[in-house]
Amino acid sequence: MASPRILPDTLPHTLQDLPPAQAHLCLDVQRFVSRELGVELAGRSLLVAFSGGADSTALLLAFHYLAPRLSARIAAAHLDHGLRPESADDAAHCRAFCAALGIPYFGEREDVAELSRRKGMGLEEAGRIARRDFLQRVILETGADWVLFGHHLNDLAEDQLMRLMRGTGWPELGGMAGVDVDRSLLRPFLLTPRARLREFLQAAGVPWREDASNQDPAFLRNRVRHDVLPLFVRENPNYLTAAARLWNLARLDRELAAASLSEPEPGLGLGEEPDTLVLRAEVLDAAHPAVRLRLCKQALTRLGPGQPLMDGLMDLEHAWTARRIGAAVRFPGDKEARVAPEGIVFGRVRRFVS
């Protein structure tokens, strides 16, 4: 079980008491959230997803120091997945850590292995669902405005490489978003290297928990982390900086695409069937293939949640250029696009069932 004296007596009490390097990390994070993500946290209620690992520990500690400056309220949420013998000790550590800092703590235990069996899905997917549902319950209980996650620059670089392996298109190739308004999700550390977070904790003498499953090569992310990413860093010691630059370029393109969604798309109108959209043939034929892909992606995005995948968009492009009338391509979110004489018709799958 966690030690009753989980924090050192020498831990600074306020942001002003921190050594310069640690204070700068906190302030850099605040600036990143405000300037790059466009989110103001002053007066907000913040919920930190707290696993007890180094990343989420650094996140919770940083916002413990920032909260008075922001007039913000913080709480921590920990879900015990019940997958490892030491998971109960992890939960006890998290509870004690929050108690030592005076941070409200919300914890639950979920049998993720049983959920996986019951739903017929993998452990990772079951864990994501359990975590999502748990956080939603805590959001409702606390009235939190934002949920904060500890993903950092190394995580971002790994995510970019995995997206490259899957053939992800642009701008999604830039990696995970720093802010997701629909899910009230923030990643304040996204451009902060892992090493800087560990230095922050080590300088403060603050402990964290290690998850042995992060070393398991059965998981793709672990293979990318331990085998693939180091190769890129060896070839380019500034690779993490390059990953941050790629993310920023993608962010700008995402913002442009999001802004364009608020404007009427030329050639995009309501279809003859209920709740369908149609891109007119004359507009599609006049457009460059790259523009056609963007138009189709935006039409699918207008239909609601579900990320249009590049494979599907390319299949749709080929079906259109070959004029395979009646050809249909399925997309995540129960969406479908059909090639029709008048253009490409987009809608929910159920709308196309005769």
Image: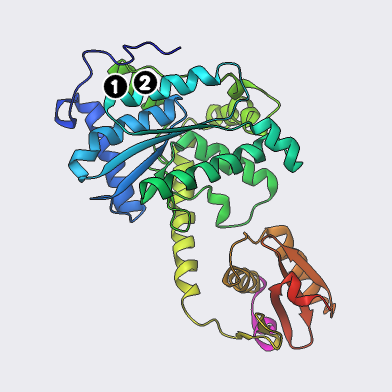
Q: Quadrant of the C terminus?
A: bottom right
Q: State left or right for residue 12 relative to residue 62.
A: left
In magenta stretch: residue 45: no
Front residue of 9 and 301: 9
Q: Is residue 307 visible?
A: yes
Above or below 74: residue 347: below
Q: State left or right for residue 162 relative to residue 198.
A: right
Residue range corresponding to the magenta coloring: 282-289
Query: Disc 1 versus disc 2: distance between alpha carbons?
Result: 6 Å
**Label disc, if present, on residue 100 of the rendered structure:** 1
Q: Residue furthest left?
A: 16
Q: State left or right for residue 353 relative to residue 29.
A: right
- Which residue is drawn at the image coordinates 64% and 85% (left, top)? 283
Query: Residue 280: which quarter of the image?
Result: bottom right
**Label disc, if present, on residue 96 of the rendered structure:** 2
Q: Is residue 199 visible?
A: no
- Which residue is drawn at the image coordinates 59% and 62% (left, top)? 305
Residue 120 in the image, given as x and y percentages of width and height: 77, 41
Residue 253 in the image, given as x and y percentages of width and height: 48, 61
Front residue of 330 and 263: 330
Front residue of 328 and 225: 328
Q: Are marks 1 and 2 in contact (CB under 8 Å)?
A: yes
Query: Residue 313: which quarter of the image?
Result: bottom right
- The three-letter code of the residue at mark 2 reads Ala
Using a 10 Å C-alpha cutoff, classify the residue at mark 1 as few (fewer than 14 neighbours), some (14 to 19) or many (20 or more).
Answer: few
- Which residue is drawn at the image coordinates 66% and 62% (left, top)? 333
Q: State left or right for residue 182 relative to residue 24.
A: right
